[in-house]
Image (cartoon, rainbow, N blue to C red):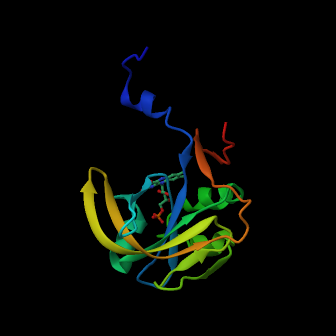
Amino acid sequence: MQVPVAYEQAMARKYPEQVAIAIARDAQGKYNPITLGWTMITSHEPPLMAISIGHTRYSLEVIRHAREFVVSFPTSAMASEALLYGTKSGRDLDKLAASGAKTQSAGVIDGVLLTDAVANFECKLVSELETGDHVLFVGQVVAAHMNEDRTAGRLYSLGDDRLGGVTPD
Ligand SMILES: Cc1cc2nc3c(=O)[nH]c(=O)nc-3n(C[C@H](O)[C@H](O)[C@H](O)COP(=O)(O)O)c2cc1C
């Protein structure tokens, strides 16, 4: 039986939630990563991905300036990097340098890929929509990359600030 509860209480049951990292180049030339839970694929033809960025995030002005970004799917071994990118701001820190993450140049856009990630998608911004306290950016995928090592699984948010892998039932 379903019982009515506060929004926050029901939403606390959503985990595990996928984790993605969006990276865009700021006006100073620094590539800034932000950890995201709110992402989706929203079209196959053309291939489109949507990411939801809060009004307070440095990434909001960075993506509006760059008009292109990489969406990276981190592995379960990349929890500490994802936590750093999701708790520190690029206003104060070069997060990629601080994490020591391996990167490589994107092929089509001016961006970087996370070398150890499961997959990386290069996106060009096609539209944005104000959605309450976040902005939904829609990017068209112009190039896709995947890790040669197919054994690495994706990183998920597990709730209570825990990040880790998920084993299917
Ligand atoms: C697991 C996790 C998921 C997150 N999901 C989002 C999200 O979907 N959208 C968002 O705007 N911030 C999200 N955040 C918070 C941002 O990553 C965080 O505020 C970050 O420090 C912003 O960096 P920036 O100021 O360099 O853009 C998430 C953080 C974590 C740890």
Q: Nearer the viewer, residue 74 or 147?
A: 147
Residue 121, horizontal then vertical, whole percent: 51, 71
Classify residue 140 as left or right of residue 88. Answer: left
Q: Nearer the viewer, residue 66 or 119?
A: 119
Residue 137, horizontal then vertical, whole percent: 34, 64
Write down the quadrant of residue 65 in the picture: bottom left
Classify residue 17 as left or right of residue 28. Answer: right
Residue at 72% in and 57% down: 77
Q: Residue farthest to the top?
A: 1
Residue 103, horizontal then vertical, whole percent: 64, 78
Write down the quadrant of residue 125 in the picture: bottom left
Q: How many marks?
A: 0
Q: Quadrant of the N terminus?
A: top left
Q: Is residue 29 above or below residue 44?
A: below
Write down the quadrant of residue 106 in the picture: bottom right
Observer able to see residue 96: yes
Residue at 37% in and 25% down: 6
Residue 99, horizontal then vertical, whole percent: 66, 68
Observer able to see residue 87: no
Q: Is residue 3 above or below residue 60?
A: above
Q: Nearer the viewer, residue 52 or 58?
A: 52
Residue at 44% in and 28% down: 9
Q: Is residue 77 above or below residue 47?
A: above
